[in-house]
Image (cartoon, coloured by chain):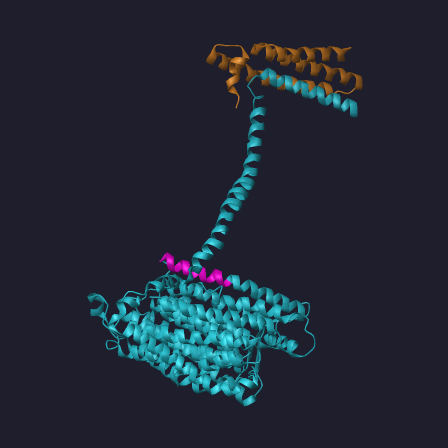
Amino acid sequence: MLIAVSMALFALGLLGVIVRRNVLIMLMCMELMLNGVSLSLVAFAQQMASVSGAVLVFLIFVVATAEIAIAIPIVLLLVRHKHAMDLDAYADLKG
Amino acid sequence: MQHALSLIVGLPLVGFLLNGLIGHRLGKRFVSVVGCGLPVLAFLVVVKCLLDLEQGGAPLVETAYTWALIGGRAFEIAFYFDRLTAVMALIVTGVGSLIHIYSIGYMKEDASYARYFAYLNLFLFFMLMLVLGKSLLVLFVGWEGVGLASYLLIGFWFEDPDKARAGKKAFITNRIGDTGFLLGMFVLYQAFGTLDMVTINGAFSSGAAPAVSASLVGILLFIGACGKSAQIPLHVWLPDAMAGPTPVSALIHAATMVTAGVYLVARLSGIYLHAPEASAVVATVGVTTAFFAATVAIAQTDIKKVLAYSTISQLGFMFVALGVGAYGVAIFHLYTHAFFKACLFLAAGSVIHALGGEQDIRKMGGLARRIPITFVTFAVATAAIAGIPPLAGFFSKDEVLWFAFASTRGGSTLLYVAAAGTALLTSFYMFRLLWLTFFGASRMSAETEHHVHESPPSMTGVLIVLAVLSAVSGFLALPHYLEPLLPVPQALPQLEHLETPLVLVSVALSLLGLIGAAFLFGSAHRADPMPHALQGLHRLLSGKYYVDEAYDRLIARPLYWISERVFLRLGDQRILDGSLNGIAALGQRTAGVLGRVQNGSLHLYALFVVVGVIASLAWSWRHG
């Protein structure tokens, strides 16, 4: 059951990343995917009766926090630069 | 004395190294002493070896170094010294030393004095290797080496593109001949498993059926001899080779190197004795070359070109003698020719020196009293080559003519008539040269006339020595001396009674040439317009039968066309460059198409990632 929820969360997040244009929403969708994966880890850990999965989830929280802490300022700077939240406005950032 | 033969060859090499490496730092005196001293020493060693040879009787053999040992067969740098080698080595070192000494005066002003002597010594080294080599392989190394030295010396003043081009022409023409030589060597090696010349000669003379056709080998080797000795159709390089300094022309392109082909055929006489067809080819090519070169010499106006064509013609004479089996006689003519032709070239060099570089005989005349020593030596050598008795050329040429007529090995009346006609022409063009250069009124510009001076003693001394040798060297019965090695053919018995009358005929011919030249060029009417019928002929002769032009049309231009169109434009530019450029363009175009995917849209990237992940999952599902 929990696995199904985690898969749904992941799929929703992925869909959001692909179809939405707004940068902040895309970031939130990415968090959603991450949480889906974390949920599956916890579920598997419970099934296997092992704590290592749960411990790994804490690690993921830490990394996700750090990642968001960098991602949000980048988004802020970009928006300040072009006054747009639409990701397609930044297509010229490609190499 | 041990290692005497290696010493003969090695001495000039030492000279080359000393002069070539440090000569330009140590000054002209050092260069002259080394450059002339070592050849003279080599000459003395040759004399010593000759004395040993006459005392011991058996040929001297010496192995200097084993080059390679392949499957039990040794390739050795070995030297061999018999009477034939002795004659050749004496000419090479003797005349060579004299010309070295002459060069001191002639090249005094040249900036590249050390380089000149280094090359000259290098030439002697290779020439002695050629002459002393025991096997064809060593001979071939020398053969190629003299070609290299000749190339370097013809193009000695390489700042002038014409002279550099003459050097290249000589080298390339020689390479064409060398192809035949190499093929001949391959055939011999395959048949006998050795390149030792004594063994090869023995294998042919042993009476058993030889493993290979003597005529095939003979003709292949003769192609090589043609290239080196400037016989038709490979004669075109020798007249151009006159671009080199005059002493070089005397040493390499008259006395020694160009006679290497004659030496080769004489040394391998064992083959030619059993190859009547090859001998007939040799005689025919020889007499044709002799005759046509003599006709060209009549119409030339450059003093050195006349002598160059005369050299080609005299080499033709030697090949006539070789073709009728009179090998010793050919060497005899080679030997007398070395003296008088070296003398003629050096005297011509002295004339050119006196006139400050003028070579056109139309702008000479009346020099007899101005430069008397040069004149006398030139006149003696001219009389010698024309065959006026009792000078050297008379004896050797007369013997060549006699055997061309009466030899049982291919002598014929036709051969004799052509050769005798050539002898007449020789006398005529040589005396024409003498008259135009030294007699009559002066045709020099006042400026040149003012500077005319006799050459320094180092040059005139050499001229006198060579003139004396041209006069007396005919009294040495060389064919008789060489007879144990090179048998003299029998004369046809029914013709033997003609021997004395034919001597008179050849004397008459040379005197006729003298009188004809004196009549035509000695009087003041020389400027008379030529009869109309002769003008076309004269144009043909002074154009040297347009052989160079014909070669250019028939060989050089088609080759150039093929190189340009087929190899360069089609092969190199279209196929090679085209395929490489095509591959590069393909990569570029593919990259252009694929590059469009990277358009900066993060959504698209994510979609691709998802598609990829799903596809690989599906694949692993199917194949897992």
Q: Residue at position x 67%, y 18% from top?
A: B610
Name the main secondary structure of what is drawn in magenta: helix
The C terminus of chain B lies in quadrant: top right
Q: What residue lies at 57% left-to-right and 73% top-to-bottom?
A: B279
> Would residue B6 appear left or right of B606 to someone viewing this image?
left
Q: Is residue B620 above or below residue A1?
A: below
- The percent position of residue B228, horizontal first and vertical second, equals 49, 67
Residue B202, horizontal then vertical, whole percent:
64, 78
Q: Quadrant of residue B117?
A: bottom left
State left or right for residue B450 relative to residue B408: left
Q: Which residues are magenta?
A: B160-174
Point out residue B369 in the picture as x, y percentages from the top left corner: 24, 77
> Is residue B4 among what the camera can see?
no
Residue drawn at (58%, 31%) of the image: B586
- Chain letter for cyan? B
Task: From the viewer's side, name the closer residue of A7 and A73.
Answer: A7
Q: Does residue A25 appear anywhere in the picture?
A: yes
Question: Magenta stretch: residue B173 in it?
Answer: yes
